[in-house]
Image: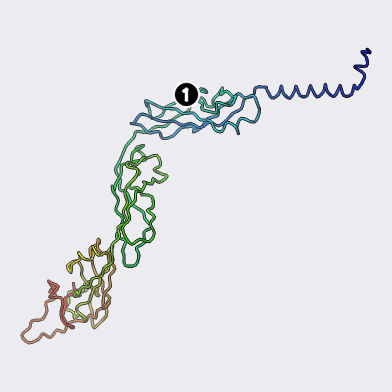
Amino acid sequence: MDISRIFTENWIYKIAAIVLSVLLWLTLSADTELADQGVRTQLHVTVSDSAWSLVEVRPPEVVTTFRVRTRGVLSPLIGQPEIRKVVNQVTDSTMELPLSPSEVFYDAALDVDPILLDPSSVTILLERRARKRVPVRGRTDAIAEPGAFVVGMQLTPDSVWLQGPASFVELATEVDTELLEVGTVSQSVTRQLAIELPPALAELTAMPANVLGTVEIDSLRTRRFQRSVTVTGGSAQTVTLDPPSVTVSLTGPAGLIDGIGAADMEVLADIPQSIDGPASYPLRVELPPEIAASVTVDIVPERVTVEPASRESSPGQPESSPSQRESSPSQRESSPGQSATAR
């Protein structure tokens, strides 16, 4: 057997095989080399001391260095690791929390090891807890069907406790509910609604977190009243009104309209300080604020003619005193041409 032929025959292929073997070995060696890779790590800090609230963590996240065997594939595989810390006892409003690589939560199935944290500690800012009771304001898109009326929205309870950092509690004056979406309705609707805190009060907690909201619906009703007119705003002079009384129609929730009496309203005509001849003035109706906010008012007629009363008195009848005022509704109702005193 010729040993030399073993090395000389097909020598080109043999050299190529050797080169490929070396390249394959180099590639496999590079893949198994250890490498360090930094991954952003989120911090979750919980304060169990009930007298204190966590305000801020500085910085809110750290970088964990993992030792890996394959370059460039850790970040998409591991996701975002996290560190969870519990503060059982608060000693000051500003505290330093040390961190350890052993506290990092990550996918343990990966062949990696956390070896370093940057920074190795974080600063937490805390504040004394406080609480305050504030009113709740309901929100709804309710629209009454024809012939009905949205009386309002009742909440049970109508106030809640807000608790959290004292500086945030101090800012709170009221809170809103989530929107009660009912659309067009013909009868009352009750639902449970969550308390919604604005971003400025996001650090607070509402107790209870939910309230019962009721959109109250009532049927519409109209009542008419015959009321005499009182002049106001002018000087104390006697005037005549035409007509001396008008019809007032009030339309609103039946429960409210049924409870209104003649004494709850007054029909007024505002006149200037002095008048020289007949003039027409618009009328307005004065109602208690709680009634005026829920009813519509119609006056027929809408204007009244005012003119100075004649200075001549009827035989045997004294002239009206400038300071005279009508004292009862029956006295204010009279025929056209009745005298009245400016208020």
Q: Residues within 10 Å of mark 1 (few under 14, many from 20)?
A: few
Q: Residue 88's image quarter?
A: top left
* Rendered view: 177 above or below 129: below
Q: Which residue is rendered at x = 31% and y = 54% of the image?
A: 214
Q: Which residue is rendered at x = 33% and y = 55% of the image?
A: 189
x then y, percent, for residue 187: 31, 60
Quadrant for the C terminus in the image: bottom left
Q: Left of 269 or right of it: where is 126?
A: right
Q: Residue furthest bottom?
A: 315
x then y, percent, for residue 244: 19, 79
* Rendered view: 311 above or below 248: below
x then y, percent, for residue 105: 51, 27
Mark 1, residue position: 98
Q: Left of 143 or right of it: where is 60?
A: right
Say which of 302 and 72 sits in front: 72
Residue type, numbered disc 1: Pro
x then y, percent, for residue 83: 49, 28
Helix, strand or loop for disc 1: strand
Say which of 176 and 281 sits in front: 176
